[in-house]
Amino acid sequence: MNRLTAQTRTGIAAVLSGERHGWRSRFLFAGPAIIASVAYMDPGNYATNIQAGAGYGYTLLWVVLLANLMAMLFQALSARLGIVTGKNLAELSRDHFPRPVVWGMWGVSEVAAMATDLAEFLGGAIGLALLFDLPLIVGMAITAIVTYAILILERQGFRPIELIIGALVGVIGLCYLAEVIIAPVDWQAAGLGMLQPALPDSAALTITVGIIGATVMPHAIYLHSGLTQARAVLRDDNDRRKVLKFSNTEVVLALSVAGMVNMAMVMMAASAFHQGHSEVAEIETAYHTLTPLLGAAAAGMFLASLIASGISSSVVGTMAGQMIMQGFLHVRVPIWLRRLVTMLPAFAVVAAGVNATQALVYSQVVLSIALPVPMIALIVFSGRRDIMGAFTVNPVLRVLTVIGACTVLGLNFVLLADTFGVAVPFLDE
């Protein structure tokens, strides 16, 4: 899964040996965090961000900021695991947990991979269907073909896929940069919304749970540890420290971009829908409402970003599924078969006539159920000195990860309880 071109490997070796210097050398280490960041800009985030902006204006921007900081913490920890041990999270789980636990973890992770693919496929398909006036099932077929075409490039080394994903992330970012320029954003209110925590009512709390609860994605945790393993020949702990420094910098930069994109989604929805259209909650409705409010260009860029998000996250989801299966079972299946297994549920949902946005919501619920598995495993392994050696997380970082995990898992419990109609006292009016 993690083959780099010979030129990239040679360049990385030159940096680690001290033969190559300068800021350009950092680009040789870029890639893993950019790919992982796609999980935070996938179509599953669109509906939640639209609901937050349309219903509450700029008030919930602080939630997006908090969620982004949590994402940085756990993705940095996942990358650290791969760099230090040379193994990914699934492989370490297979090596250190009892066999029944390993089988259970794999089963939950496979279901999560299917749920992830459902959200990603639907997002790309909705964008294509709206932009070109196509049936949703045709949009899904196009998304499947494009995704498979990108995945085939792995035969040329892994770097080309990293560059393509980076380009698609750039498209998403540029589209939303244009959106906030076109939309009449109240920047003062946006600044207050980022720095002044507030929850106007119980519905706002539910949206907050959705934003934070779906931030740390199961497949992103597995994948990031795999993308950093064995990217370079690390001779000693000094080399590991150098790579960790590059990795942490990339995590902060890549997830900062992802966070800004999510904030831009909320700000666009706030400026366009909050006054007079606060009921907007679905992607299709947002697109049709944007056209008369901000013009065809804004609506078109909204769909372009959604398509780029759907395709890129679908590629990343397949990569994660491949890594999860190979790590837990030591079985590697052809890309076309892996792609087929995870996309069949998405086609079944559309063929059954299920509401697309509703399916997106339920896919996030499934991910919420699966999330504790990789998160707890990551915390356990990163704190074991026999596995991490000198790179075992320090007490302060360990406390932060436990607090972050408890926060995310607690909010996921509230989300699941509310979804299935279980009474939660502080969510009642």
Image: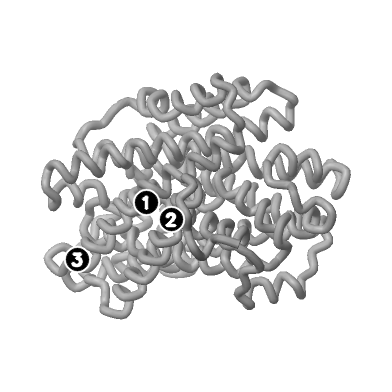
Q: Earlier in the sequence, mark 1 or mark 3?
A: 1
Q: Earlier in the sequence, mark 1 or mark 2?
A: 1
Residue 339, how many percent across, how many down? 41, 28
Compared across the picture, whether 346 is left or right of 172 comes to: left
Q: Which secondary structure, mark 1?
A: loop
Compared across the picture, whether 253 is left or right of 109 comes to: right
Compared across the picture, whether 406 is left or right of 92 comes to: right
Q: Which secondary structure, mark 2?
A: helix
The quadrant in which residue 289 appears is top right
**Residue on which disc 1 sits:** 371
The quadrant in which residue 115 appears is top left
Eye-nearest disc, 2 or 3: 2
Amino acid type for the residue under numbered disc 2 = Asn
In the image, 10 versus 52, the foreground residue is 52
Q: Residue at x 51, y 61 (%)?
A: 255
Q: Is residue 258 visible?
A: no
Q: Residue at x 26, y 40 (%)?
A: 106
Q: Which mark is residue 388?
A: 3
Q: Which mark is residue 412?
A: 2
Eye-nearest disc, 1 or 3: 1
Q: Which secondary structure, mark 3?
A: helix
Q: Which mark is residue 140?
A: none
Mark 1 and mark 2 residues within 8 Å of each other at the beta carbon:
yes
Graded by Cα atoms within 10 Å as few (under 14), some (14 to 19) or many (20 or more), the crowding at tag 3 reads some
Q: Residue at x 32, y 41 (%)?
A: 109
Residue 349, how many percent across, how many down? 52, 26
